[in-house]
Every structure is written in structure tokens, then in C-alpha cells.
Amino acid sequence: EAGVAQSPRYKIIEKRQSVAFWCNPISGHATLYWYQQILGQGPKLLIQFQNNGVVDDSQLPKDRFSAERLKGVDSTLKIQPAKLEDSAVYLCASSSRTEPYEQYFGPGTRLTVT
Amino acid sequence: GQNIDQPTEMTATEGAIVQINCTYQTSGFNGLFWYQQHAGEAPTFLSYNVLDGLEEKGRFSSFLSRSKGYSYLLLKELQMKDSASYLCAVRDWDSNYQLIWGAGTKLIIKP
């Protein structure tokens, strides 16, 4: 089966600009996650969707970040306006339908804010 | 609170065995995962433990002791391609069954 798809792979923007990332999970996976990973750290969960509903967005900086998952399949994550500290890799993952519900990750988007 | 601890970096020799430790503190333990992450790539699932004991999968094994809040990943017959970061993550039912991630252990394999 096809893996988790993400685009773009790389993005360089200036601070205060906006950016959007796209994710297409593995077919049939109801749960989708967006993570932020800073170099040398583990992934930090930004938002978790179950179908098209939000399960947890407690760590999403809602003043600048937004995410949606229309129709319970594809998802987009947006940052507006970007700050220097947003430079990171943004990973999208989806969960297996069976125990142990392991997460499958996309290749990520490396964002550099200058 | 919730906390995952792993060594920052380890070095081992090709062909040898290495053990990467992980200690955790969570309020609602519901399983422990190990992921491998090569530089510049996404994490990939290696193993899962929910009961105490050893799970073996080829050259990789993972051990769990829930009473001690401790796990290790054992890599045998090390190959150069095993150079990567190894992330320990605990699923916590008290946090919507989310994964709580460690910072990862960077493993360097030398010839």
C-alpha cells in the first residue's frame, strides 16, 4: 500500500510570511497527526484528527497555526505569520487500523524561516 | 508529570551488540514503541511492547519492565546502516492515547 505523502519537501520563507503543508495519509487510516520536530528532539504533537474531527490540539499555537482535514482524508497545516522559531521539520503521520495502532510517517517538510 | 529519558548519543562497532536504554514516567502507560530515524528521514516503526518481557524481531529485540518504568532496544550484529537515531515513545491513555516521545539516541557505528 502507498505510504503517507507530504508536500512540499522543503520550504524557505521569510518571517511574517505564510506557508501551507499538505498531507495524504495511508488509505483507510482514520487517525492523522501533525508533528513538529526540531533538530535533536523528538516529535512534538501539534494536532490529532480522528476522521475530520479534532481529538487534540492543545499544543497547537492557535494564534498562528491552523489545520484542517476536510472529508476525513487529506489534511493541510498552515502557519501565518511565520516566526524564526518555526524552523523545523513538519511530519504528518497516520495510524494503523489494528493494534498496536503504530504510526506511519510521511517524509516530512523541512521549513526554514529566515 | 510525563517524562522520557534516553542517552543522547552512543557509539558502537560494526558487528557488535548495543543496548539503548529508555526510562519513562507517565500517568497512564499503554504501551511503548521504538522507532528508527535516519538523518533527514521520517521515523519508522521498529517494535512495540505492552507486557513485561522481551520481544524479538530479527537482529532487533525490545524489552519492557513496567514496574521499573524501563525499556531497552537491543541491536545485534551491527551494520553500518544501523547508524541512526532511535526514538522511544510511550502511549499514554491519560493523554488521549497520544505518544509521548523521547529526544532520541543517536547511534554511531564505526567500522
Image (spheres, rainbow, N blue to C red):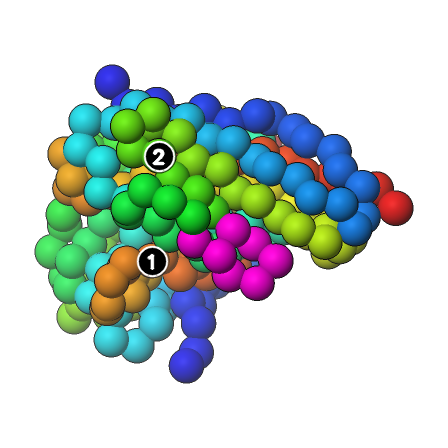
Position in image of residue A25 (x %, y %): 34, 68
Q: Which residues are magenta?
A: B55-61
Q: Which residue is located at x 52 percent, y 51 percent?
A: B61
Q: Residue at x 32, y 42 (%)?
A: B52
The answer to whether residue B59 is magenta is yes
Mark 2 falls within which chain? Answer: B
Disc on res. B65: 2
The residue located at (45%, 24%) in the rendering is B5
Image vertical order of residue B67 relative to residue B110, above or below:
above
Pick whichever, B72 or A15, lies toward us.
B72
Q: CA distance from mark 2 to mark 1?
A: 20 Å
Residue at the limit of the structure toward the front, as seen here: B53
Res B99 → quadrant: top left
Tag nearer the camera, 2 or 1? 2
Mark 1, Cα crowd under 10 Å, few <14 / some 14-19 / many 20+, is many
Q: Is residue A96 above or below residue B66?
A: below
Asked if labels 1 and 2 touch by Cβ distance under 8 angstroms, the answer is no
Name the residue: 79% across, 51% down: B15
Residue B73, above or below B1: below
The image position of residue B47, as x and y in percent, is 43, 54
- Who is closer to the viewer here, A64 or B25? B25
Query: Number of marks in the image?
Result: 2
> Would residue A84 be seen by someone viewing this image from the given angle?
no
> Chain under label 1?
A
Residue that extends furthest to the bottom in the rendered view of this protein = A1
Q: What amino acid does circle 1 point to?
A: Glu
Q: Residue furthest right?
A: B111
Residue linked to disc 1:
A102
Q: Element at badge 2?
A: strand
Tell me if residue B31 can be seen: yes
Tell me which amino acid carries mark 2: Ser
